Image (spheres, rainbow, N blue to C red):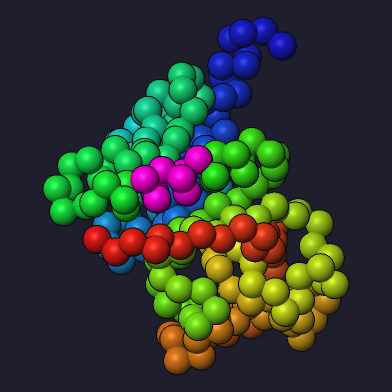
Amino acid sequence: MSNTQAEHDLASPSARAKRLKRLRQLANLSRQDLEKNYGIKYPTLKSWELGNYGGLTRKGAAKLLSIFAQHHVECHLEWLLYGKGAEPSLISSITVLEHDAACSSEAEKELQWIQQELQCFRQHYQHSMVMHVNDDNMTPYFTQGEYIAGVKYYDVVAEQILGRACIVETVDGETLFRVVQKGQSKNKYNLVHYNLASINPVLYNQELISVTPIIWRRQLAMTF
């Protein structure tokens, strides 16, 4: 394949779509989050993530990158649009905390340890998935603020996941943290919150792209 053809493929709507979805998941944002909090219309975002109608625009990419930066995801426009330059990365929590005079040095050290552990986890497991729990839907077994991680499986084996807390990717493009239960039809699963008082505690008969059982978790002991 020529360099020109390779560059063309990296800039194609489908390639942009994959990079955009990766960034959104890294920022731990759902399509609903982006519509509700930032005005990115759900159908528009879905179209961009499927590479339809020409795919992600330059204007749309710039707006999304500014949003992702607020969620500690650093990425250059050239990478999102053309696949060029440095890969996206999580902005170090330590860097963020340096600007907050209220944070103690002990909290900074603790966050640094967590970041180092996550880095080692990613290096050790090729298909790792990491999430920062940002709600109370999985209480009392998981708490808001925890960092969780696991190894992603694309070929879902029911015996390995049923009844377990997992990070799941649905065919609708959502990344969720739920307990996986057997659905009412083949290859479909019910996704359940531990906290049944939460909104929409059960999503029924969901088709999954990948499942990540949780094998690593950490929580800050310090409050600040």
Q: From the viewer's side, name the closer residue of 205 and 95.
A: 95
Residue 217 image offset from top left, x and y in percent: 56, 60
Residue 207 image offset from top left, x and y in percent: 70, 68
Q: Which image quarter holds the N terminus?
A: top right
Which residue sits at x=17%, y=48%? Answer: 100
Which residue sits at x=62%, y=58%? Answer: 216
Which residue sits at x=45%, y=92%? Answer: 197
Q: Is residue 106 left or right of residue 44?
A: left
Q: From the viewer's side, name the closer residue of 158 and 206.
A: 158
Of all residues, the one furthest to the front in this rendering is 106
- Tell me, yes or no, if residue 30 can be seen here: no
Q: Work out whether 140 lies above or below 176.
A: below
Q: Work out whether 140 lies above or below 122.
A: below
Q: Is residue 66 magenta?
A: no
Q: From the viewer's side, name the closer residue of 159 and 215.
A: 215
Which residue sits at x=44%, y=35%? Answer: 89
Q: From the viewer's side, name the closer residue of 7 and 111.
A: 111
Stretch of the chain drawn in magenta: 109-116
Residue 210 image offset from top left, x and y in percent: 69, 58
Which image quarter: residue 3?
top right
Which image quarter: residue 61?
top left
